[in-house]
Amino acid sequence: MRRAIVVATRNRGKLAELRPMLEAVGFDVIDLDAAGLAEDAAAEEAVEAFATFEENAIAKGRYYRALLGRPVVADDSGLAVDALGGAPGVRSRRWAVDQGAVAASDAANNRTLARAIHGMEAPRAAFVCAAAYCDGSYEAVERGVVRGRLVAAARGEMGFGYDPHFVPDEGDGHTFGEMSAGEKAALSHRARAFQALVGRIRSAPRRD
Ligand code: ITT
């Protein structure tokens, strides 16, 4: 029997990846709009105040589970650049703002990335995703990682965020921004984290 799950993200790019992934393995996906939860940007940003992806993912999961009273999955993810000591890491969405930009946007973040890696030769980096499940009694969190290198000049219009700058080691030399959703999902941090999480959810008692 299919299982209903709230995918608790305001990020359209993440949702576009997670919906088909979760539907393919038997979930009925409810996004935050369909759940009728208007955005509260300040409160939602305050939730992810921790230093690790796992803590932030669990915090988001608990926050939305408490508001909606239904089982939720949440994702905290980002880019970690080796030569920058793992930055921007959990600050990935706010990186440009942290550096003085007026508003957070993929374009501003990608300009910040291009500046930060200027002069570096194929800098090593990883995308990291922590995927959390919370249903009010059972909680689980799983990490997925994909390693690769960065290119200073953006390539490709697909995906979101830093995708046009990231070339995964296991791919064919294309950036995530040049890959179809299916190609990215075959090796992404998000797919790996959620694949592991789904196994944990299946072993939890049903609460939907
Ligand atoms: P929610 O918290 O509502 O889910 P968010 O965008 O704030 O949305 P995060 O705090 O987890 O989510 O920040 C993730 C950021 O990391 C995202 O905005 C991108 O800049 C980057 N990122 C994460 N996964 C990515 C991916 O698959 N491709 C490109 N960039 C990614």
Image (cartoon, rainbow, N blue to C red):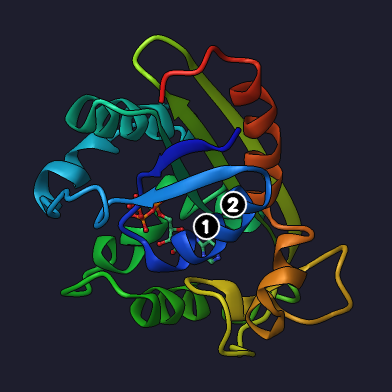
Q: CA distance from mark 1 to mark 2?
A: 6 Å
| Residue 95 coordinates in the image, percent (x, y) | 35, 62
Q: Amino acid at mark 1?
A: Arg
Which residue is nearer to you in this view: 108 or 30?
30
User: Residue, x 41% and y 26% (percent of image)?
Assistant: 208
Quadrant location, the N terminus: top right
Q: Is residue 158 left or right of residue 40?
A: right
In the picture of the structure, the residue carrying the numbered disc 2 is 23
The tag on residue 19 is 1
Q: Is mark 1 within 8 Å of ligand 1?
A: no
The tag on residue 133 is none
User: Comparing marks 1 and 2, which lies closer to the viewer?
Assistant: 2
Rendered image quadrant of residue 200: top right
Q: Secondary structure at mark 1?
A: helix
- Seen in the picture, residue 164 relative to 207 is either above or below; the reply is below
Rendered image quadrant of residue 107: bottom left
Specify whether residue 72 is in view. yes
Name the quarter showing ligand 1. bottom left
Q: Residues within 10 Å of mark 2 (few under 14, many from 20)?
A: some
User: Residue, x 71% and y 45% (percent of image)?
Assistant: 192
